[in-house]
Image: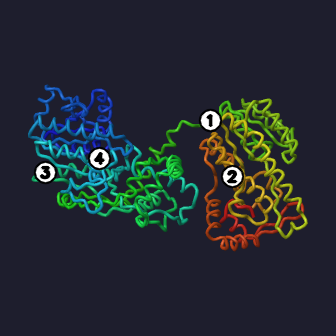
Amino acid sequence: MEYLVTGATGFIGKHLLDQLVRREGRIHVLVRPASHEKFLRLAAERWGRDAQRIALVNGDITLPGCGVADEDLKTLAGVGHIFHLAAVYDMQADMETSRRANVDGSRHVVELANRLGGATLHYVSSIAAAGRYRGVFREDMFDEAEDLAHPYFATKHEGEGVARRECRVPLRIYRPGIVIGSSVTGEADKIDGPYYAFKIIQKLRGALPPWMPLIGIEGARLQIVPVDFVARALDHIAHQPGLDGRCFHLVDPKPLSLGDTLNVFCRAAHAPRGTARLDNRGLDLFPRGLLQMAGRVPVVRGIRRDMLDFWGIPESVLEFADWRTKFDAREAEAALAGSGIACPPLKDYAWKIWDYWERRMDPDLFREQTLESVLRGRIVVVTGASSGIGEELARRVAAAGATPILVARTAEKLAAVQADIAAAGGKALVYPCDLSDAEATRAVAEKILAEQGRVDYLINNAGRSIRRSIGESYDRFHDFERTMQLNYFGSLRLILGFLPSMRERRFGHIINISSIGVQTNAPRFSAYVASKAALDSFSRSIASEVVNDHVHITTVYMPLVRTPMIAPTRIYDYFPAISPAQAADMVLTSVLTRQKRVATRLGTFGEVTYAVAPRVVDYVLGFGYRLFPESTRNGKAEGRPLPAESVAFAHLLKGIHW
């Protein structure tokens, strides 16, 4: 038996050839001349010695008769099966592109099949040919398709119609569901369909613990099938006698809802899952015209577009979220009976799909952004640069090719950091300033701009922390004033000093080092947390005013860091804390990504928990408050060893200041 395959270099095509090379007979593949070399490399790598049975045929489905020359037709005389797989499987493709491949391409393949005569045409369509039919769509249905406005739905339906009307040789039609990677290896070739949700899942995993329940959406049932199932089913059904003239739905007999599908992938990614879910069918209670009108409102459209852009989700993909067609597959199930070929449950192979995507397809893997590419030649103001996090940041920024401007009170310490940076081949500039002094801060901002011409990045790292319970603070109003002067007003003055030029130049990034205490409301730190929360609130408020000027604002909610600032509190010797280098990693992540907030999972969990159960948080924090000793008037906590209970509690809530 000889075969002819179009679309052999495509996703389904490669897996179909995996099956065909196991059979006897020559395999002809229709390939454009420009793609010959690419296919030969693929064949050698994928099929080894079996590739010798694969013959290339010059052709292009966009040309009449697929552009196959008369002399090549003679070599195809023995073909008994033609598999037409070449098509546009892209929800984002426009009508012209989709029509050229899915409709004109189908017509040209049918022309070729008719010229050859005698071969069975195996036409691979899609469940999209049903449009948005409401109800059960059987395999013997076609004209009943509804709502074909989308280019992909419309052209898949029209292309199948061409095959049905114009084919004069035996015809079998196959309608696969939404095809994803292999259930065996996870292999995939592009990001489409459910893959668009993977970045969101990855971000949730990074922000929240996996056991935290979330509110998700229910959505319609998704017809997701792995590519190896589709290829094996195609191969098996094509070789069964007596099935000409039939259509076969290659679908999952027990499809999961959108919410269940997302939860399966969340489980595979070790990310939190949507325990409670909202059912979008509740929108049916509202008049359809009213919903469509609301969707056309410019503000609503703008918010929708911006949110989808942020998550990297094409708007066209939303068509699947409410796709309520159910697909009957009795013909396919009967044809596959006894073969051992069946669509595997998604839960059995979702981890392979996720693992392959994260290791080989995650868009972040292909970004050529490095700290050097982002920072080279930039001016970066780092406050609190004489020690701890600020010193580490200054060194890393300089190593990336930027010029850090070192700001802190002590000129001698800054000069030492500057000398170390110069010895390592970098360049740094020193601007000593007491940022709690209003006039000095205003003056240093003006001086930096006057001498350097611009500031590209401002990292507000300098800060003062006071550990003292409210009961010990009734007569210490100056504690609150001191922390506000440095942590809030000092940072605020620099922002107000540099922001106008950033907006004018339409480039700038302000990074504020906040605290996990703002998220968790840590006891004994009311003065410190209030000052950091003030800067956080200010930044969130102005962010919407400057975002269109390409000025980004990031808040980094830092956990406990082992720096000189916490050294006087001797009980912290027993606490888990991150290093200044790890803290710098958090900050530099925001430089690369420009994300709005960088936080630990525990911090985010504390913030969410307080929003839904504040009284519970009060009891937990109250328990922790009683476990740890008070600080003395000079800010030092007693240095005697902590009880095992206290140490265990500190490790359980790692990173929180107590």
Secondary element at image label 4: helix
Q: Which residue is drawn at 16% across and 35% down?
A: 112
Secondary element at image label 1: helix
Is 107 rendered above or below residue 268? above
Tell me: 170 left or right of 626.
left
Mark 2 or mark 3: whose residue is earlier in sequence: 3
Q: Where does label 2 land, which residue?
A: 541
Is 156 rendered above or below residue 217? above
Q: Residue at x 27, y 41 (%)?
A: 102
CB-based contact (under 8 Å), mark 1 and mark 2: no
User: What's under tag 4, amino acid-wise?
Assistant: Ala
In this view, the residue in front, 346 or 185, is 346
Tell me: 48 left or right of 93.
left
User: What's under tag 3, amino acid-wise?
Assistant: Gly
Mark 1 or mark 4: whose residue is earlier in sequence: 4
**Alpha-carbon neighbours of circle 4 within 10 Å: few (<14), some, or many (≥20)?**
many
User: What's under tag 2, amino acid-wise?
Assistant: Ser
Residue 538 placed where, x, y %? 72, 52
Q: Where does label 1 land, which residue?
A: 374
In this view, the residue in front, 564 or 220, is 220
Q: How far apart are marks 1 and 4 (CA)?
A: 44 Å
Q: Where does label 3 land, which residue?
A: 245
